[in-house]
Image: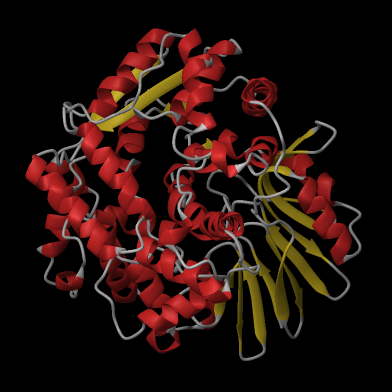
Amino acid sequence: MLELHLTNNRAFAWQQAGNVWTKGFLFASNGRQYVGVDLPEFFLGIETEQDFAERLREANGSFCVAVKTANGYMVAVDRLRSMLMFVAQRDGRIIIGDDANALRDKLGLDESDLDALKVEELRQSGYTVGSHTIYKSIAQLCGGEYAVITENNYSINYYYEHTHGNFMTISKADAFQQLDGISERMFKRLIESVDGRQIVVPLSGGYDSRYIVAWLKKLGYENVCCFTYGRRDSFEVQISHQVAKKLNYEWHFVEYTDETWQSIFAEEWRSFYEYSGQLSQLPHCQDIYAIKTLLERGIIHKDSVVVPGYCGDVLGGSFLVEDKTLVEISKTGLAMYINKCHFNFMQPTNLTAMVVADIESDILKDISVLDSFNSEMEEWLTKHRWSKFIVNALRGYDYFGLEWRMPLWDNELMEFWYRVPNEHRSRVTWYDEYLLTGVFKEYDIDIVKDMPAPQSLVVSNIKRLVKKSPLGNEARKLHTYIRRKLGKVQDFNQTSSICNYIKNDSRVTGTENIADPNNVNAFLVQWYLQKIIEYH
């Protein structure tokens, strides 16, 4: 038996036309926008799997789609999995859906169906590896994937890979000129897609969200509201306020205290954690209190569009390995490196070797030189860490019924950076330089983000070395120790309150095995894993 179960209409409602169901928005290669009731039209007339994959590669936006075929369905998510789709199979029954919790309940799954390896991966990193959830019977689509489903079975395939290569030979001046053109086009697409509504920007002290507000100002879009949150003495807050003031944009601050964080563990938030975690990823709670507060105050409108600056620095090359002597140039070497750098929330267990093998199984191509090592690493991290761990913070917006956009993952910008040689994406990157000497300087917001302390350069250099170090947990422990000794550990968002709250929750066990006692994500994952079992 084959069922289609689409129920999540919180921010983007499902639309149907003929044999096509869609939600989201996208731009076609001819520049036409497809959104709302028009979106299914983009996928009408598809007859073969090849047609489906070609149409998906053309789509520039955030969406998910299901197409009914003569033999079943074809379903897909966008390149970054900004919207979710799952396929569940058990006892001759296959259900396609957009809510893993609902599929678990429809199939009657219980604790016996949990996959110990996937639970360990979520516990160690905040997400599961590959097209899996923590339940054996429920699969998920990753960024750039589609599934072909029949009455009896299903297969999951790629239509897009986030690999770097075919590097262009280009001067810095020509690259920056191209970036100006790309930036103008992609922000015009953003402006067209919001159709005059209020744009809400979570404005930090970094470059990515500043990139967004600077170009909105450059293109004359004034219906913009900026906000930030945390402690009043945070340098993030100070820079954010300064940038908004320079651009003459509305700016709001929401203070976070111990009481703020404790309040989001109340029973009223239970549905958010279930909705955001989807049995496969860390529920991001960082800005949900700020969003709720600003909605209640009437500052954010109910039809507003939230535009966060996710992951622009990643495209710019912030996670590149620069020295091949620090890593083993092979698939196994990359898997070990990813495990050490990103699967370190808890102390190693007897499943650690299996986690490394699972990471390696999801590396697509052979690795022989440093460029291929970096390309496969960035592809893997985009498919997993960025889409499942960072972009999942979007659930905090659509939970409240707010639409969102991710302009820094526009196809045109993405594919430009995938062709920039890696020597221009490391150390002082072209990404940073393009922004600081270009649109930031134009509006006098070329503020270099750094911790406001004399030792900040030392700390940031240590952090950079740690990122490249093959020593993994030991290097990170050294970094934490030095920061503490310098007296510069500053909890700008007061997240230590989360760690303390969960440590003091007698119903949550295993926190003594958390590798870094200040890693709030490690505590949240441990809490989430035990709570979903308790709730269920």
> For residue 35, what is the image quadrant?
top right
Residue 35, compared with residue 341, is above or below; it is: above
Residue 130 location (% of width, % of height): 55, 70
Q: Is residue 444 left or right of residue 70?
A: left
Which color scheme does this rendered protein use? Answer: secondary structure
- Is residue 269 visible to us here? yes
Q: Nearer the viewer, residue 150 or 51?
A: 51
Q: Nearer the viewer, residue 312 or 407?
A: 312
Residue 37, compared with residue 118, is above or below; it is: above
Residue found at the very far front of the displayed protein: 325
Residue 486 location (% of width, % of height): 10, 40
Residue 84, compared with residue 403, is above or below; it is: below
Quarter occupied by the C terminus: bottom left
> For residue 41, what is the image quadrant?
top right
Residue 167, compared with residue 70, is above or below; it is: above
- Is residue 508 visible to us here? no
> For residue 4, what is the image quadrant?
bottom right
Quarter occupied by the N terminus: bottom right
Residue 243 location (% of width, % of height): 37, 16
Q: Nearer the viewer, residue 379 or 520?
A: 379
Which residue sits at x=31%, y=35%?
290
